[in-house]
């Protein structure tokens, strides 16, 4: 990250901390919200775009933050890479591997968020046959 990005991230985190009480009763409520929308409980681990969305929510500029679901192309890529690279090509093995990477139990690949799917695809690409 560049110095400007670090400064922006610090500014956004500070403003979220200042304004969080406008929408959240306590930190546990905020953590639950952040985990459900971004898959993270720490502001420092969030991207600049995620922090901007969180700040808009804290300032009541938006009523909710939409969760970006994975695309059909990402789902197809996950299945294609899994069948190409996995030893055990079963669906349950795929779901267990997804859990190891994302720490999220799922029933279908469609339940992944866009960022989780991207993270999983990158991991699959790094696997050797």
Image: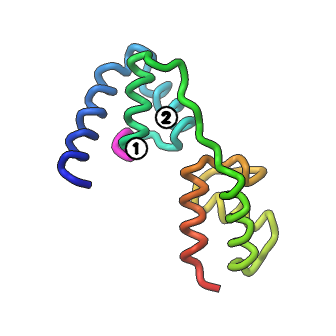
> Is residue 7 found left or right of 96 in the rendered image?
left
Towards the viewer: 106 or 53? 53
- Quadrant in the rendering for residue 80: bottom right
Looking at the figure, which quarter contains the C terminus? bottom right
> Is residue 76 found left or right of 126 in the rendered image?
right
Towards the viewer: 117 or 73? 73
Q: Residue at x 77, y 77 (%)?
A: 88
Q: Disc 1 marks which residue?
A: 46
Q: Residue at x 56, y 58 (%)?
A: 118
Q: Residue furthest front?
A: 73
Mark 2 and mark 1 residues within 8 Å of each other at the beta carbon = yes
Q: Earlier in the sequence, mark 2 or mark 1?
A: 2
Image disc number at residue 34 = 2
Q: Position of residue 46 (x, y in %)?
A: 40, 44
Q: Residue at x 59, y 65 (%)?
A: 121
In this picture, which residue range is highlighted in magenta? 43-47
> Is residue 10 found left or right of 88 in the rendered image?
left
Towards the viewer: 26 or 57? 57
Towards the viewer: 96 or 129? 129
Looking at the figure, which quarter contains the N terminus? bottom left
Q: Residue furthest right?
A: 90
Circle 2 residues within 10 Å: few <14, some 14–19, many ≥20: some
- Quadrant in the rendering for residue 99: bottom right
């Amino acid at each position: 990250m560049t110095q400007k990005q670090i400064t922006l991230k610090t500014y956004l985190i500070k403003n979220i901390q200042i304004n969080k009480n406008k929408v959240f009763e306590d930190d546990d409520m905020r953590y639950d919200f952040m985990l459900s929308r971004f898959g993270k409980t720490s502001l420092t681990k969030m991207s600049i775009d995620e922090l901007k969305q969180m700040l808009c929510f804290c300032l009541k500029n938006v009523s909710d933050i939409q969760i970006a679901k994975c695309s059909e192309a990402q789902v197809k890529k996950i299945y294609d890479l899994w069948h190409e690279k996995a030893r055990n090509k079963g669906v349950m093995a795929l779901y267990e591997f997804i859990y190891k990477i994302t720490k999220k139990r799922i029933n279908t690949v469609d339940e992944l968020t866009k960022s989780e799917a991207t993270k999983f695809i990158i991991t699959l690409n790094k696997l050797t046959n």
